[in-house]
């Protein structure tokens, strides 16, 4: 069984198909447009559109949309990120055409009823308030706001209460006209089908939509000076993010950055931050690092949540771990183990066919190609200790690190 196959319809819609066994199947449309495509007065609009796409089409009301997949035991969902929007579904394999037709209808024929828009505004405003009550989540948004100052990447995906209240149908139609282009989309399928079956059904329901318009060019964010900001809030815990800009998704350094982040504070219980701070001292229950790669920049961050009395000591220990990676290359044995662990993480992730389908589609969307697992493992194996050392000195350089603290 091949890992995946790709093909393109005459109207420029790119398709990714992964053949799987079993009775469950997954499909989704992913659009190369998210928060960063918003104009100044449109903060939160991409997310608002994602919500209101489900409120009615030319032939369905919101009940029929929500019931179409749910009524056969499936799931219909969507998400908005900084650089993409996605509508996806999971279902028993005999309902593939039902899911494809519904996603096409939602994507191209939504009517955005004014009454439903007004109700959805209240729901999203409540979501905004919910995030503000969760400092461990809000601190990430605020950190990006400062790191990508005066750039759409720094905007909260949800928008603001004021911006959400201001949205009209014209805002939606303008955004869709600019961004919802067939050539700006990828459709993914994972299931027990033949390639011919998949192509025939997608062509039937997407093939008559033509590409119109030019895909908007993105403007890279300007580099900002490092900042150190403390916000006083009324919480039991203190929260802190230490971070900086990092390699972009197309960068040749991206895989090295993934490995370096995994070693420092990734999901494994044996990460340096977990072993040398949480387990050794017990200062912080919530402590990890993350790396997000965008199309023209990236973000590295260490997050910690701790008792106020341990805040200074914990941040000092984080800086100490970052300094260790800048002072000397890691040993051959540790490098080998780090590579094994990352390859193992990737292998285990292949068990979730829904996430694999979305990841393959996103790769096609961003790079117009997909690397095989063999190629990915080989790229990881080629990383040297010196490359990680150089990368640590580039990204973890102390004068480049910014901090945001809630205390």
Image (cartoon, rainbow, N blue to C red):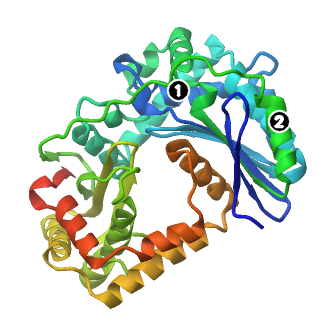
Q: Circle 1 sits on which residue?
A: 48
Front residue of this view, candidates 328 and 264: 328
Q: Position of residue 98 (x, y in %)?
A: 85, 38
Q: Residue at x 64, y 16 (%)?
A: 112
Which residue is nearer to you in this view: 217 or 321?
A: 217
Viewport quadrant of the N terminus:
bottom right
Distance CA(mark 2)–CA(mark 1): 22 Å
Q: Which residue position is annotated with label 2?
A: 68
Residue sitting nearer the eye, 155 or 244: 244
Q: Quadrant of residue 53?
A: top right
Helix, strand or loop for disc 2: helix
Residue at the outermost front position:
10
Q: Quadrant of residue 169?
A: top right
Residue 134, horizontal then vertical, whole percent: 38, 47
Give how far across and how far down residue 378 sits, in percent. Answer: 49, 73
In percent of the image, x 40 and y 75: which residue is there? 382
- Is 163 positioned to the left or the right of 19 in the image? left
Name the residue at 78% across, 32% down.
Answer: 102
Left or right of residue 198: residue 121 = left
Residue located 17% across and 45% down the image? 232
């Amino acid at each position: 069984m091949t890992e995946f196959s790709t093909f393109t319809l005459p109207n420029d819609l790119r398709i990714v198909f992964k053949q799987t066994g079993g009775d469950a199947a997954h499909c989704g449309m992913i659009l190369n447009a998210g928060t960063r495509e918003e104009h100044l007065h449109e903060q939160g609009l991409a997310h608002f559109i994602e919500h209101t796409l489900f409120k009615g089409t030319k032939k369905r009301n919101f009940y029929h949309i929500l019931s179409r997949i749910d009524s056969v035991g499936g799931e219909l969902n969507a998400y908005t990120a900084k650089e993409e929007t996605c509508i996806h579904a999971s279902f028993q394999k005999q309902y593939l055409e039902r899911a494809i037709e519904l996603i096409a209808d939602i994507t191209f024929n939504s009517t955005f009823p004014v009454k439903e828009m007004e109700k959805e505004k209240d729901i999203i405003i409540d979501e905004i308030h919910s995030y503000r009550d969760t400092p461990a989540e809000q601190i990430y948004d605020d950190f990006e706001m400062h790191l990508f100052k005066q750039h759409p990447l720094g905007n909260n995906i949800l928008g603001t209460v004021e911006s959400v209240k201001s949205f009209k149908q014209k805002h939606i139609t303008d955004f869709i006209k600019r961004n919802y282009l067939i050539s700006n989309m990828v459709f993914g399928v994972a299931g027990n089908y033949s390639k011919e079956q998949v192509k025939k059904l997608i062509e039937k329901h997407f093939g008559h939509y033509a590409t119109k318009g030019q895909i908007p060019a993105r403007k890279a964010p300007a580099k900002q000076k490092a900042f150190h900001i403390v916000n006083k809030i009324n919480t039991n815990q203190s929260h802190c993010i230490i971070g900086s800009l990092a390699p972009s998704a197309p960068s040749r350094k991206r895989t090295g950055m993934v490995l370096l982040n995994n070693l420092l504070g990734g999901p494994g219980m044996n990460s340096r931050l977990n072993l040398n701070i949480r387990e050794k001292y017990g200062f912080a229950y919530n402590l990890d690092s993350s790396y997000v790669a965008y199309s023209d920049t990236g973000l590295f961050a260490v997050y910690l949540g701790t008792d106020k009395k341990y805040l200074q000591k914990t941040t000092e220990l984080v800086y100490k771990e970052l300094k260790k990676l800048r002072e000397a290359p890691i040993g051959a044995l540790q490098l080998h183990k780090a590579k094994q662990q990352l390859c193992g993480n990737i292998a285990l992730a292949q068990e979730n066919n829904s996430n694999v389908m979305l990841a393959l589609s996103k790769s096609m969307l961003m790079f117009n190609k997909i690397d095989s697992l063999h190629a990915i493992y080989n790229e990881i194996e080629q990383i040297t200790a010196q490359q990680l050392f150089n990368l640590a000195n580039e990204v973890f350089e102390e004068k480049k690190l910014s901090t945001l603290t809630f205390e």
